[in-house]
Image (cartoon, coloured by chain):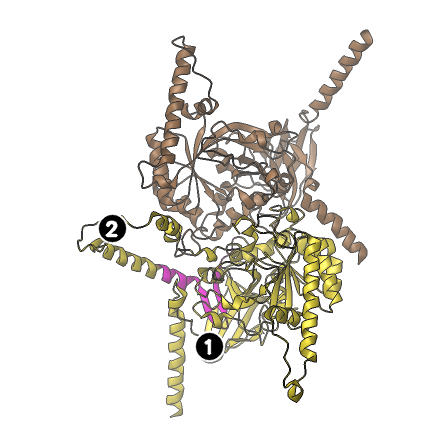
Amino acid sequence: MIRQLTLTFTLAISGMVAAEADWTPDIEAWNSPPPPRPDSVLVRNATIWTGTDQGILENADLLVRQGRISAVGQNLSAPRGALEIDAEGMHLTPGIIDAHSHAAIIGGVNEASRISTADVRIRDVIDSESINIYRQLAGGVTTINLLHGSANAIGGQMSVIKLRWGASPAELVFDAAPEGIKFALGENPKQSNWRAEEPRYPQTRHGVEQVIREKFQLAEDYRHAFEQAPRGRAARDRVPPRPNHELQAIAEILRGERDVHSHAYRADEMLALMRVAEQFGFVIKTFQHVLEGYKIAPQMAAHGVGGSTFIDWWAFKYEAIDGIGYNPALMHEAGVLTGLHSDNPELARRMNLEAAKAVRYGQVDPHDALMMITAWPADQLGIGERTGRLAAGLDADFVLWNGHPLSVQSRVEQTWVDGRRYFDRQADLRMREQLDAERAELMALALAGDNDGNGNNDGNNNETADEPARRRVHSFAAHLTGYRASELDHDEYCIFHDH
Amino acid sequence: MITEFLSKTLAAALLGALLAVPAAAELTALTGATVHPVSGSPIENGVVLIENGRIQAVGADLDIPDEARRIDLDGLHLYPGFVHPGTQLGLTEISSVAGTVDTAEMGNINAAVRAEVAVNHDSELLPTTIAGGVLNAHIVPGGGLIRGHSAMMRLDGWSWEEMVLAAPVAMHIAFPPGAVEDEDNEDLRLIERTLDQARHWHQARAAAEAGNGARPARNDQLEALGALLAGEVILVLHANRHDVMTAALDWAQSQGFERLVLSANADVQYIAERLAADDIPVILRSVYALPTRRWEAYDMAYVAPARLHQAGVRFAISDSGGGMEVANARNLPFQAGSAIAHGLPADAALKSVTLWPAEILGLGDQLGSIAAGKRASLFAATGDPLEPMSRIERVWIDGQEYDLNRDRGRRLYERYRDRNRAVR
């Protein structure tokens, strides 16, 4: 009986393993089945970049159980029925964490109307169907921070998501992530690079500083009003304070319940925001872009703010003129928690090369450079206890590379999230075959059939003459490329958009 | 009188001596490095002899004349400077500040525009690009349908005139996408009408010069098209989308243009066979691009160089060439490197940003490899320069060593590194 049970169990396991091996994603998220989660996975003989004090382990193993990392080390033994992956010659790293993304937001990234839109929430507009999610998995990204744009000094509430391709918007949200909000300083909130139909205050950097300070004053008053409002019987027949979603969100910052991630380029404005925060008794969590972070790195370290930066983007607007590739090296050396982000759905797919450039400019140690796209952005987002490193107890979010992860010649072979293989180069190749077959089938049907609905198979599939030309022009680009505008959106380019 | 004459002579002699300094017949020997000629196999512990700004000899066992100045590059790797096949470097400084942007003239017919005359030789972007090993670039004007003449330039000089290596290199035409399905496309008709007018104008002028009629009224636009019509410059066709590319090539061939180069995005891989059959070279605008269409494979743009190479197409890798990418022209070699990860052989990747762009744009005798007779435009790196982890340590342009501290990034780095260390 027991033997029979064991046999059944083993068969079930092997059946599951086979299903795991056959799993093929779909190009449409709604039609993409979640990959199975093997009970246990053992990756053997890899070069493991741990993202911890252990550094890089040669010829090491990673054991995953129930979606979590169970052990990292040499000569681990596989539990019965474990899915084993021989990673001889391959490198294993934590999944990449992108602390600044707009890659999966429906509609525009900017609610550009008011100077503070602290009341709007990204989690209401997560685009789980965005192809960017799948493509970024193919670049080794496992978690991204979806942020509003930088059109206003106080933007909206951010949302950290895991790239679980095929899951619903609610299921993408990373439940362990603390709440956060986007702030923005400089040219974008002061509307320098486009002509606003109705200019609004502020139009200067000191105006931006002032309006933020004032919002914190209002939020403090709002908080006091609630704290001092009578409760229980004493509240009877009294008008309670009026709820205000905007001030509520800003008051959460003051209570330490919402982290501030602020877009900024120049040293002056970053220094000013740190001083405002200190006046109200909290610490800015990160500066985003932070191109001149190297100029005030000691002050940033003293305040305790992290720096989430680009390597390359400089000189595209005046406030970016002093952006230098050496910024990560200098912030890191000064003791600033330093990370690299994409802010761009294309760049997000090769963040490993951004880390490589941190080695190029200022000779950051390669393992530290890798931590700039894994462990440290995870810490900046407050999720470092769950992901971004390869250590027992953390989520099994990892990437298998066919070579050195910072080499331009390397490619992602597999990307795992929560112990599920969401990207697999082999599965991707299978998907292409399926898509080609489907396309051929549809083409055959189209060529054989009646295409214009006039009842005749006359080979005429022209649109009817009364189809408005304007509509055709508008849908032209979408028909050709299949992209929705929001899939290509990224905030830094908003200066070229027609606001 | 005599004094004045003498002092003038002396001044002239002094000025002559000063001017002669850069071009002095000094012999320089770069020794100890692994030399990567590109046109041949790497040479360990090789020697490169430089005289008058040109490479005099390359080899492993060269006799180094006693008078030669020796520069030891032990442990480094010598490569020819990268050649950018199409960018607007020098024509733009800060893309959001209109006063610094000269990338696109208004109007549809800009045949008479010459890109090189607007190149700011003191642009802050140039030293940063040079620090990335990109030492030469094809500078391309951007506005309208017929966009004007481009120039090949080295990226350092005391004026744009000093930077020009060849001009004009090519006439640029943006093929109108609307002409794919519309035989009467207005934009294409305008291009054709302009070319026809130019043909007639040049016929009339030739006739006038032969004494068979009056000289036609001057017309700068039509006159400028003469080099293209005579086959003296390349025609670069700009197109995205494979159907537009095909239509552009059909059209250009029907017009009788023989020296064609196609400047195109990753969609170009879909017409690789035709390009190979007709031997039309390609400037591939960006390996770092999202797939052209949502449903295409994630690596669609990454594999484009390998697909072109397999089909036998001659090509050079470029970035998008304009907008925000101009400030990041230094990343050109990494685009070629990433193509290796997706199937392009490593030697082809290196050629795609050195020798091939030089050859495709008609400067194969001057640039793109470390070979005798070529310009001494080269750099020493800590390793494979297609790898972002490698660093470029020294640069020579036409035999003169370039001061890498002119790079704004390096200057700010050193200044703030020292300050931050001091306050710690």
Q: Secondary structure at mark 2?
A: loop
Q: How many marks?
A: 2
In the depicted structure, whether residue A344 falls above or below residue A284: above
User: Furthest residue to the right?
Assistant: B3
Give the percent coordinates (x, y) of residue A142: 52, 66
| B7 inside magenta stretch | no
| Residue type, numbered disc 2 | Asn
| On-image quarter of the N terminus of chain B | top right
In the depicted structure, whether residue B126 falls above or below residue B4: below
Give the percent coordinates (x, y) of residue B82: 56, 39
The residue stretch that appears in magenta: A409-432
A387 or B240, which is in the foreground? B240
Mark 1 surroundings: few (<14), some (14-19) or many (≥20) residues within 10 A: many
Q: Chain of mark 1?
A: A
* Chain coloured brown in this rendering: B
Specify the colour of chain A. yellow
Residue pointed to by mark 1: A82
